[in-house]
Image (spheres, rainbow, N blue to C red):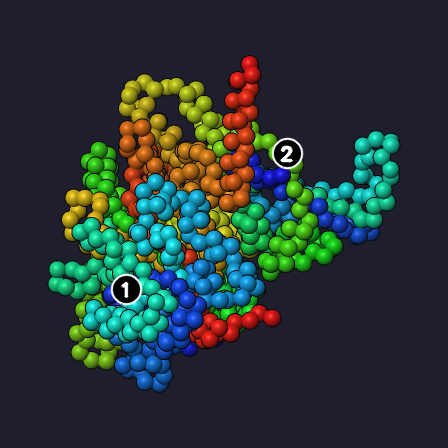
Amino acid sequence: MTVSLELHDIQGNVVKGYGRQHFSFARYILFAIHDERAGRKFIRNILPLITTATPWKTCDNDSGGVPKPEATTNIAFTYHGLKCLGLPESSLHSFPTDFSDGMRARRDILGDHGKSAPENWDPVWNHPDKKVAILVSINGQSTVAIENRYKEIQKILEGVKSGMEQLCGHRGESGAEDLPYQEASAIFNEQGDPTPKEHFGYTDGISNPFFKGTGKNPNLVIGSGKPSRDNPEGWAPIEPGEFLLGYRDESQETPKAPTPPLLAKNGTFMVYRKLHQNVNSFDTYLSNQSTKHPEFNEEEIAAKFAGRWRNGAPITRFPTEEEADNFVKSVKETKKALDNAKDAIELEEAELLYSVLLSQYSAFNYDEDLDGSRCPVGAHIRRCNPRGSLEYGTKAYATPGALTNRRRLLRRGLPYGDSSDRSRDDGNHGIIFMTLGASISRQFEFVQQQWINYGNDFKAANEKDPLLGNHGVDKLGRGNGKMLFQKNKGSDESPYFCSHIPRFVDMHGGEYFFLPSITALHFIGRGTVDGT
Amino acid sequence: MSNIAGKAYAMNVVTPIKWYRAWINRLIFWAGGLPFFSSHLKGLTTLSLIHYARWALVSPRQFPRLDESQPKETIKYTYMFFFSNFNGSWNQYVDSFHMAIPAGLDLFWHKNIKYPNSIPLQPFHSYINHNQIWTNHYYNAYPLATSNDIKAAIAVKKKLKKFIELNNFDSPELFQKEYNKLLNDVQEHLNLMEPTPIVSLSAEAVEKRRTADHHRFRNRAASSS
Ligand code: HEM
């Protein structure tokens, strides 16, 4: 069944990963609302700037779409924000509890303790009398584009005088505590080109769920849709209701949503987390572990932790460093051939080869690797998206993705800060992690709690995600995280043990947001939401 | 009043069936034990969060009276009792069942009154919620252990015992070789058990109050002795 999404009514960041489309810069701005009318006026005035999911014109195709902008803008609300805007009680009560509780109240579910506890978050989240109401995000193809858009928004803000306030208190470089916004961007190489890397050196932003109605190339379903025994490719597109309210979901119904239905349809929920990366601890751990137990070198341990080599090649498919390097080399060479193609035949050949190669980044599952001897069962990407492996090869479920299809995360967001000084953990470097979905508790919270900070679904008891887990410390102050790299089952090789893993990622602040449709924004702006 | 003890959750669901239809359900349960059908229920054993699940039919005549003095009731229906202990939250369990073995569920609850089928999810949730009986008292001797942990411990114990009995380690090299083989053999069972992640904010609040009460009780007992 084909589904068409109302792309013109959906905010752009739901369907488009801006980062992958040359938007290398972003700025996230938080606001408090002091006066309902001012808040509504702000929404009405910013509405023309909001980027929708309408496809962008490509140079070789002027059949449809809108021109690609230099900068995009999106807007989202906390529960508190919706209250400030005067939404009726009946609508407010119809929102799910995860959202109305907010991220701070849910810290015990998320494992945000110790250094990651809300008291230690960036001050912007801790103003006693000024709670975050609105998040505006700008993504830009250049810093100039960001700055221009930012100025436009500042003007709109001036128009509502003291009725709204842009909140300061984002931490930044050199101990800055009180910045008026959060800056994020791709990490740039020495030539000044943006890279797809994050601060631990991994290529990020490769896998994202493929769902119906986005108009994306249908071949991309392999490895990014849901595992399926009914389709010859072994994959089928996910129902859009997993990521958008008002559409059919994987349980064959429209997801639970706030009322009235027009408020919810084409909207979704968004999780924002500023995740600080302890780069020194990470480098040190790899180096110490590979020195003490040299069966694996640093690159290999890094790859086993993530489930991908740092160059992006999936380890279950490219089990040795050499294979992974050769794979990425051939991707690069094919890209070069594509750029330098002299005639139509060369171009066509290169294009075909290139798309086949690219697909290998995502087109895999763990069926041939159930014992985890290539990609450990506890690796980050295998935990966060087990790709049908929770059926343990038994073909016992109605569908191989029975335990995973409703837990998929649409990831957005970008790295922030600079980690060129690797000699220290503190400073300003990490990821602004954003994930979108129809249910915060079923998708993000479940993955964070059950799959990142716990391991029973993988038969790994309390073992945590090596990269993201909130590992504690033992009596000597060493990290107490553990991980086991499985070996070929039935061989006489002992598994490889990593112990004393410290916490590599700390939480520095965040919140749950509702990302309404354009229609809902109109109603909220005019103050005409009424569920009766 | 809580269905949670350590890592385990106790679910009791009681649902009515018209008495003259119940023989079909009995037939289904009987067939469920046959090799042909039980292969269709592999999902139940693969869902590793389940300690156990049991279905039982009780016809009107079978309802016990505590004592002769308890008045006889006229019971109209045959009832199906469903009991299960599992690891994780209500949602995790019900949703896993609904996604993994929807056809199996529809068979077990065949023609139960107002059973809505296991797909879609929201009506199924309401049905289970409506018919669930809350647990008054629930004791768990091993609150840190999930069903996976128990199976793992049994497997490790068995293999370790065999390894010790083998005992033909003539040289350190041979020992190392056999020991590595043992580790390989148990690699999927070597885990660390710690307390459960919180099941919900309300379950956590109950747990905190219980611990506080427990401390108060102990202190009082200590000071009075
Ligand atoms: C500093 C924090 C994080 C780092 C460094 C990190 C790193 C990575 C890397 C290197 C990949 C592989 C690249 C790719 O497939 O796109 C990845 C994938 C992924 N990560 Fe993370 N991650 C972080 C936080 C998180 C969090 C908090 C979650 C979920 C709550 C998460 C969920 C995922 C998912 C779902 C995938 C895709 C898996 C797949 O589809 O195969 N990540 N991450």
Q: In which quarter of the image is the C terminus of chain A?
A: bottom right
Q: Mark 1 lies on which chain?
A: A
Q: Is residue A39 visible?
A: yes
Which amino acid is tagged 1? Answer: Arg
Q: Residue at x 69, y 49 (%)?
A: B131
Q: Which chain carries label 2?
A: B
Which amino acid is tagged 2? Answer: His
Disc 2 secondary structure class? loop
In the image, which disc is placed on residue B137?
2
Q: In which quarter of the image is residue A210?
A: bottom left
| Separation of marks 2 and 1 at Cα, in angstroms | 53 Å
Q: Which residue is drawn at 25% across and 45% down?
A: A278
Q: Which of A531 and A21 is in front in this view?
A: A531
Q: Which residue is drawn at 23% across and 70% down?
A: A147
- In this view, the residue farthest toward the left is A191
The residue that label 1 is drawn on is A27
